[in-house]
Amino acid sequence: MDHRILTLGNRRSSAAPPMRRSWSDEIMLSVVSLTAGVAILISVSAEASRPEMSATQPGQNMKLRASVNSCVQTAMDVYDIPGLAVAVVVDGEISLERGYGVKHRFRGGAVDEHTLFRHGSVGKMFTAAAVLRLVDQGVVNLKDPVTEYVPELHFAPGRWSADRMRVRHLITNTAAIPSYRSSPEGTLADWVLTLNEVHLLGKPGAFWNYSNSNFALADLVVERASGMDFNDFLAVELYRPAGMSGATRYPAEAVAFGNYSFGHNDDGEIYAPDDYTELVDGFVSAHDLALWAQIMMSGGSRVLSLRSTAAAQKPQEPLHHYGGRPSSIGGGHYGFGLFIDEYPDAEIVWHSGGIPGWVAWVGWIPEQRFAVAMLANSWPDATNGLKNAVECIFAAQRGVTMPDMSEPSDTSTWRPYAGTYDAIYDDGFEFEVFVEYENGQLSMTAPNPDSPDQMVTRVLENIHASTFRFRPDSQSYWDMTFLRGNGKWAPVRWLRNSRFVGLRRLVPRRAGVRLSP
């Protein structure tokens, strides 16, 4: 899981701790998309002295080997990544898998395709699959209230209550639960009791907003519905049938496996796999992730039904350019625990993840049965390295690139965004946001992130469609999207940022006056 926000170009220092109310829409690792904003360098250079790849098919494709080596080694050199593992699936078969570099920067140990890494939010696809497995077994219905399985679930008093939340909302990131900023402590049952002090950011099901808490709660639903510990359920019902022999949620099992990597932070800190115990994180190898991609591209195989597999990879919720994402036609979609990016020439289903010390990425093109899985033992800047290496491979092997889709919208369409928004921060802090439209410009007044008692007014920069950027100072920014209610012509209802959501106050309607869309 993502245990703190990862900055991609909008924090003063990557080593600085996040401010309590820094509203920069810092793009989470799990929301890093494949874009063409970086130069893709594909050169067939002499191979460095790395461990040899494991050829799973005779007559290994040398072009694949050369392009993967170039893409990976460039990323490792630029981002100083100690160790990395990659697996590539071509035509539904694992055609290349190998390791690069070392498990520990100072102790060495060659990485290979079976080396275990922490996977972070890549685990969201496993949580969603666990829920769908129970759906296939007739134990869970996605329309069931979450309180049917977790009756003690309550949130802080407010406009919306827990009984409105459905299981489907959890695995589509539409439950409106603020994402926790530190790992849950104790058991999942202990953690859920702390939610009675948490305010929902909006009406469950109203809009998509990334949240680790949604999936932690889904983990608990799986426990209650199955009668098994969630970690054990994954092992028995998912990992074992999928043949993922190294995958585990238990740090002790990763250490016992023997072939594991150490995590490296950019500030120099190094973690052993069992240095911290996470309720909501686990370990996988590049080989394991490639097997999972194969299963998803082949209709679920031994794990899920055809129907559930298709539903997981089908657009369920629009992202509305979350975080200013012009990287996918239409702003992208979310399935069940999976991102779905629409490119001009292909559709890529994927998820990434990161946790102090490690980053991960896996994605596939279902129609082409082509997939890439990659893990690295470095964090957080390696996030960009992994993204660059992956998009480099997709471009080299499948010609999949994304032109810059950014296109400012017509200023005449901005007037409906004006108004007063009652906002709530993910820690419960309530405040007002004032948006004004004048002379073709939008300006916004909101509390200063550094000094919440002071108000700051800035002209908004249009990023794409209804997504805008607010710069409280010259070194930071936060992105947000104006969202309408149900329907194309519905009034604007929400102002969404990754850390807060604002509900627009409705202007009383006068008799005989039609509200502007």
Image: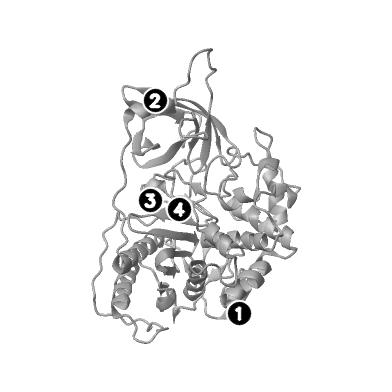
Q: Residue at x 53, y 25 (%)?
A: 505
Establish if 442 lies above or below 6: above
Residue nearest the observer in this picture, 380 or 469: 469
For label 1, the residue is: 256
Residue nearest the observer in this picture, 321 or 364: 364
Name the amino acid, label 3: Ser
Residue nearest the observer in this picture, 189 or 293: 293
Q: CA distance from mark 1 to mark 3?
A: 41 Å
The earlier-in-sequence mark between 3 and 2 is 3
Establish if 79 lies above or below 99: above
For label 3, the residue is: 328
Q: Which of the two marks, 1 or 2, is nearer to us in this view?
A: 2
**The residue tagged with tag 1: helix, strand or loop?**
helix
Q: Are marks 2 and 4 in contact (CB under 8 Å)?
A: no
Query: Which of the numbered marks, if any, corresponds to residue 31?
Result: 4
**The residue tagged with tag 4: helix, strand or loop?**
helix
In the rendered image, the quadrant that contains the N terminus is: bottom right
Query: Which of the numbered marks, if any, corresponds to residue 415?
Result: 2
